[in-house]
């Protein structure tokens, strides 16, 4: 299960670290691509509140050696799920969302078209949905 990391301040970090953390400009670009509103160094969620639980993680979900970016946020804005995430894929030079969901992302070992299936979990979900790659994006 993807851990939520608090990355504050969002623009005060050094360039890519040994652990693969995103640089400040990469985080801003990823937040915008994921649909967050960005104003200066501030990132706002869909409730127009500061996304103070936002995290950014590199993951190679399709095994091609090129990382996708997972942007995740948590809090009351996301209802009973308490969290949301967006998987971004770089197409040419532009980050594009290929999965947006409320809940917590857990990549699974199973694959479709080379892309790992993604379990979408959280409190009160009952049957946990699994998103599968359809050749262009994830569907569930």
Image (tube, rainbow, N blue to C red):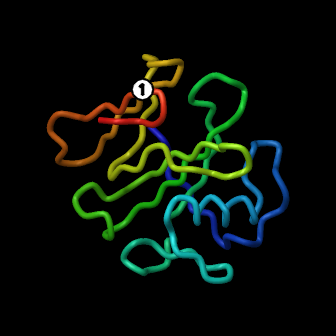
110 in relation to 57, above or below: above
Q: Viewer-proximal residue, 103 or 131?
A: 131
Q: Where's residue 80, x and y in %?
A: 22, 59
Q: Residues within 10 Å of mark 1 (few under 14, many from 20)?
A: many
Quick check: 65 left or right of 103? right
Q: What residue is at 17 percent from the left and 34 percent from the top?
A: 127
SS for dot 1: strand
Q: Where's residue 128, x and y in %?
A: 23, 34
Q: What residue is at 73 percent from the left and 72 percent from the top?
A: 11
Q: Where's residue 27, x and y in %?
A: 67, 61
**Residue indicated by mark 1:** 117
Point out the image quarter for the C terminus: top left
Quick check: 95 left or right of 115? right
133 in relation to 103, above or below: above
Among the 4 quarters of the image, the one containing residue 9: bottom right
Q: What residue is at 35 percent from the left and 33 percent from the top?
A: 131
Q: Where's residue 132, x and y in %?
A: 38, 28
Q: What residue is at 67 percent from the left and 36 percent from the top?
A: 67
Quick check: 116 left or right of 56? left
Q: Viewer-proximal residue, 115 or 83?
A: 115
Among the 4 quarters of the image, the one containing residue 1: top left
How many marks the image carries: the answer is 1
Quick check: 14 left or right of 7? right
């Amino acid at each position: 299960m993807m851990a939520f990391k608090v990355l504050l301040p969002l623009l005060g970090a050094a360039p890519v670290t040994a652990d693969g953390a995103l640089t400040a400009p990469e985080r801003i670009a990823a937040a915008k691509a994921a649909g967050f509103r960005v104003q200066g160094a501030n990132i706002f969620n869909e409730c127009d509140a500061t996304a103070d639980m936002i995290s950014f993680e590199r993951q190679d979900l399709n095994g091609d050696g090129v990382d996708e970016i997972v942007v995740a946020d948590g809090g009351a804005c996301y209802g009973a799920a308490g969290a949301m995430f967006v998987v971004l894929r770089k197409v040419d030079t532009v980050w594009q969302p290929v999965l947006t969901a409320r809940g917590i992302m857990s990549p699974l070992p199973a694959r479709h078209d080379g892309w790992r299936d993604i379990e979408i979990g959280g409190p009160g979900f009952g049957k946990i949905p699994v998103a599968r790659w359809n050749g262009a994006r994830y569907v569930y």
